[in-house]
Image (cartoon, rainbow, N blue to C red):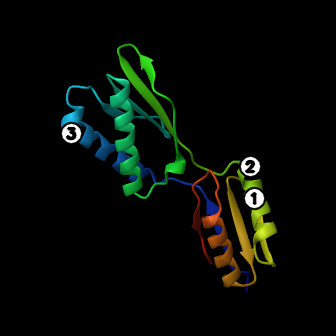
Amino acid sequence: MANPSFDIVSEIDSAELDNAINQTSKELSNRFDFRGTGAQIDRSGDEGVTLTAETEDRVKAALEVFKDKLVKRNISLKSLDAGDPRASGKTYKIDCTMKQGIATDVAKKINKLIRDEGPKGVQSQIQGEQLRVSGKKRDDLQAVISLLKGADLDVALQFTNYR
């Protein structure tokens, strides 16, 4: 029988992201403090979101509403890369991108962390934008998961394909 293993990935459920965007849009149109400010949220491309409002304060407040909705939909704020407000004609815009996948340098850092601080007999290998971790005992894999959850990495991690 093969050794137990799991994959470490960084993905965003696009349906949950759509739900967060729709809830934000609904709240921006219904809330009293956003009335008449032209506050709106739009999806731009697969991983982009644009917030627009007439003043810089309102666009920042709209970003906070969006962050709140992401947290409620179980999307980590580490996945959100929000830019600074910029003037665009008479309005202000914030361009946000949703980060997916584990970059090679972060994957190497995770690999080193598992090798240095993880239990003996656990191997990890980089496979594109994800890592595969395998070991002889399931308890060792659980220890690796708790080690990575406690580590301060600048990427949102999910653990999938636990076998």
Three-letter code for the amino acid on which mark 2 is drawn? Thr
Picture quadrant of residue 59:
top left
Residue 162 relative to residue 3: left or right:
left
Q: Position of residue 107 (x, y in %)?
A: 72, 55
- Depth check, mark 3 against mark 1: the one in front is 3
CA distance for labels 1 and 2: 8 Å
Three-letter code for the amino acid on which mark 1 is drawn? Ile
| Residue density around tag 2, few if under 14, some if 14–19, many if 20 or more, within 10 Å | some
Q: Position of residue 76 (x, y in %)?
A: 49, 54
| Residue density around tag 1, few if under 14, some if 14–19, many if 20 or more, within 10 Å | some
Task: Look at mark 3 in the image and give the residue it sits on.
Answer: 31
Task: Look at mark 1 in the image and give the residue it sits on.
Answer: 126
First along the sequence among labels 1 and 2: 2
Image quarter where the N terminus lies is bottom right
Q: Is residue 138 above or below residue 24?
A: below
Q: Nearer the viewer, residue 159 or 36?
A: 36
Task: Look at mark 2 in the image and give the residue it sits on.
Answer: 104
First along the sequence among labels 2 and 3: 3
Q: Is residue 10 above or below residue 55?
A: below
